[in-house]
Image (cartoon, rainbow, N blue to C red):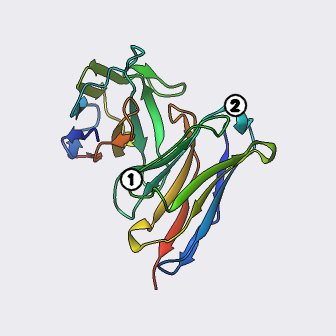
Amino acid sequence: EVHLVESGGGLVQPGGSLRLSCTASTFTLSDYSMNWVRQAPGKGLEWVSYINTSGRTISYADSVRGRFTISRDNAKNSLYLQMNSLRAEDTAVYYCIQGFYFDYWGQGTLVTVSS
Amino acid sequence: DVVMTQSPLSLPVTLGQPASISCRSSQSLVHSDGNTYLNWFQQRPGQSPRRLTYKVSNRDSGVPDRFSGSGSGTDFTLKISRVEAEDVGVYYCMQGTHWPITFGQGTRLEIK
């Protein structure tokens, strides 16, 4: 069974930074492209970012481009999302997802941006 | 960006009855490689989303065969042949053909 665990969420002030991590324990993360998707409280799903297996192909939603950075450390079997210049509208549960086809989702980590 | 429009947004269904959710895209989802990257996801209350189907009609392992995806071009449908209590939740379509990846607004299925 695929197991993805996100961490690093929490409460941060507007303008602050957070780094989310996603660790895979039951598969080799380097074999897969990965995505981040977020869901604001009570709202729908919004794709945030994509990274391919090598890390050379990366894409971002317009709403986060220039503020968020996706990366991966295949040796640590981990995926990251560095989030800078956070805004209230970035408040959401952030999910890490295995695969270009969005095969499996983690349980999510909540990011709250508020003063 | 490709806009994904789902209907209805709320779907009350009697147990054992069929249900159908429509998803329309603002442009064709046929990729230059010939594939159509349209997925359906289910999000039960309090849970993460899980994928039901990919590339329009391929059902995921463990997904009951009462779920089926169909469609082409810009019009897609998720059908549930006989709704069960465990099907309550929100259903999303998603296109992966064009960047950025976009989701439909979600359809909330409830039991009448």
Query: Outermost residue, bottom direction?
Result: A115
Which circle's residue, 2 or 1, is located before the other in the chain? 2
- The picture quadrant where one finds residue B15 is top left
Residue B14 vs B34, above or below: the answer is below
Q: What amino acid type is highlighted by mark number 1?
A: Asp
What label sits on residue A31 in the rendered view? 2
In the displayed structure, does residue A76 sit left or right of residue A19?
A: right
Looking at the rendered structure, the secondary structure element under dot 1 is loop
In the displayed structure, does residue B109 sit left or right of residue A39?
A: left
In the displayed structure, does residue A68 sit left or right of residue B105?
A: right
Q: Residue at x 57, y 53 (%)?
A: A107
Q: What amino acid type is highlighted by mark number 2?
A: Asp
Q: Residue at x 47, y 75 (%)?
A: A113
Q: Residue at x 60, y 69 (%)?
A: A18
Residue A92 vs B40, above or below: the answer is below
x, y (%) of residue A83? 55, 64
Q: Are marks 2 and 1 in contact (CB under 8 Å)?
A: no
Front-most of residues B97 and B108: B97
Q: Residue at x 38, y 29 (%)?
A: B97
x, y (%) of residue A9? 59, 67
Q: Which residue is mark 1?
A: A62
The chain letter for the residue carrying disc 2 is A
x, y (%) of residue B81? 30, 24
Front-most of residues B41 and B66: B41
